[in-house]
Amino acid sequence: VDEENIAEFTFDAFMPQIKKMLVKRNVKIDVEVSKDYEKTLNVLINGEKVKLYSQEDLKNKNFWDIATRNFFKKLNEILKQNACKEKFYLLYGGNDLGTFLLDEKQFEIIKERYKGNSGDIPYLP
């Protein structure tokens, strides 16, 4: 996943992989770019409008991070609504963003393994 893709409303590069992972968990995710996205900065996730970032975030130049967090927060809400015990965790950022679908036990194993090196521990959006 690339934060730039999310912030620029181009989801085709990574959504097929995410959908493939979620189908195995009986969770359906549809992502569409809102027709007025340039003005509203909204994306439609399962038909619900989600603001990826604000004009203030754009001005402050932190919109890549904010867009990514808002996008994956919404996906995690959908996972929870579908009784999925896993969540999307993020690692690094920018063009090096990684995402993992982990349950709490898996996250704790990784957290313990990389104890003392917090930059290598996935985080919730």
Image (spheres, rainbow, N blue to C red):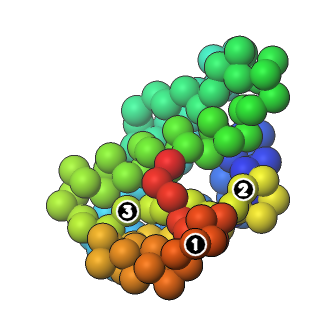
Residue 120, image quadrant: bottom right
Residue tagged by mark 3? 87
CA gap, disc 3 to disc 1?
23 Å
Relative height, residue 65 to residue 14 (above, below): above
The amino acid type, in three-letter code, at marker 1 is Gly
Q: Secondary structure at mark 2?
A: loop
- Pick the front one: 90 or 80: 90
- Where is residue 99? Give x, y as percent: 57, 66
Q: Secondary structure at mark 3?
A: strand
Residue at 44% across, 79% down: 112
Is the C-beta separation of discs 3 and 2 under 8 Å? Answer: no
Residue 102, image quadrant: bottom left
- Disc ID at residue 116: 1
The amino acid type, in three-letter code, at marker 2 is Gly
- Pick the front one: 31 or 116: 116
Mark 2 crowd level (few <14, some 14–19, many ≥20, 10 Å Cα) = some
Please tell me which of labels 2 and 1 falls first in the chain: 2
- Pick the front one: 14 or 88: 88
Residue at 42% across, 43% down: 74
Residue tagged by mark 2? 93
Q: Indicate left or right for 75 with 86 as reference.
A: right
Please tell me which of labels 3 and 2 falls first in the chain: 3
- Pick the front one: 113 or 79: 113
Residue at 65% across, 19% down: 54
